[in-house]
Image (tube, helix red, strand yellow):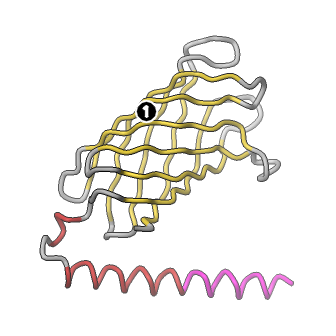
Amino acid sequence: MNKIKNIIVLTVCLMATSAFGADTATTSASTSKGILGLFDRNELAVQVGLNYQDVKSEKFSPSVGLSYFVSKNFGVRGTTVLAVNDLKTFNNAEFVAIARLPIWVVSPYIGAGASLQTASTEEFAPIVLVGLEGRINKSWSVFTEAGHSFRDKNNNLNDWSFRGGINLRIF
């Protein structure tokens, strides 16, 4: 069974590498704007990352999200942090509005929104975040960000989280 899993993982990695190389070549050869046209309007992207939050049971948790930018500078994103012991449930869900400032291949951004805390009780908390995204090509990017939830389960102002990962632009 492990051989089959290894073959599947290797095949997926080879396909991703092939698609990445083809997209990089296409982007550099066909874009009249060159590298400056990496951030566009009407972008839909899937985000996969690793979240760090100083909580008792789970400090590192996987996160997944979906973002859509209506313009080059403004968009929305929904993200959930999955429970490590059960990847079918989530600890919280975040919904934020994002403003970004694309500069060459990087884009610093800020965001504000709400987080639904589900680890202990189901209640909303306002959040802010600041981050940096770096584009590898038109489809792939890496990101890192820090977020602050203004109210945790004890109504304290000390709920920080840090996240990093990759984005795959769908269109």
Which portion, as a residue range, is magenta? 1-14
User: Residue at 78% of width from left, 46% of height from top?
Assistant: 89
Question: x, y (%) of residue 78?
Answer: 54, 44
Question: x, y (%) of residue 68?
Answer: 42, 52
For this orientation, the residue located farthest to the top is: 155
Q: Within the magenta stretch, is there residue 68?
A: no
Which is nearer the eye, 97 or 156?
97
User: Residue at 61% of width from left, 49% of height from top?
Assistant: 63
Compared to 130, does 108 lie above or below? below
User: Residue at 24% of width from left, 59% of height from top?
Assistant: 105
Q: Quick one: quadrant of the C terminus? A: bottom left
For this orientation, the residue located farthest to the left is: 32
User: Residue at 37% of width from left, 59% of height from top?
Assistant: 43
Quadrant location of residue 101?
top left
Q: Quick one: quadrant of the N terminus? A: bottom right
For this orientation, the residue located farthest to the right is: 1
Which is nearer the eye, 14 or 93?
93
Which is nearer the eye, 31 or 144?
31
Q: Main secondary structure of the magenta part?
A: helix
Which residue corresponds to mark 1?
129
Query: Mark 1: which secondary structure?
Result: strand
Viewed as shown, does residue 43 lie left or right of 88?
A: left
Question: x, y (%) of residue 13?
Answer: 57, 81
Viewed as shown, does residue 128 lie left or right of 105?
A: right
Amino acid at circle 1: Leu
Viewed as shown, does residue 108 lie left or right of 76?
A: left
Viewed as shown, does residue 74 lie left or right of 129?
A: left
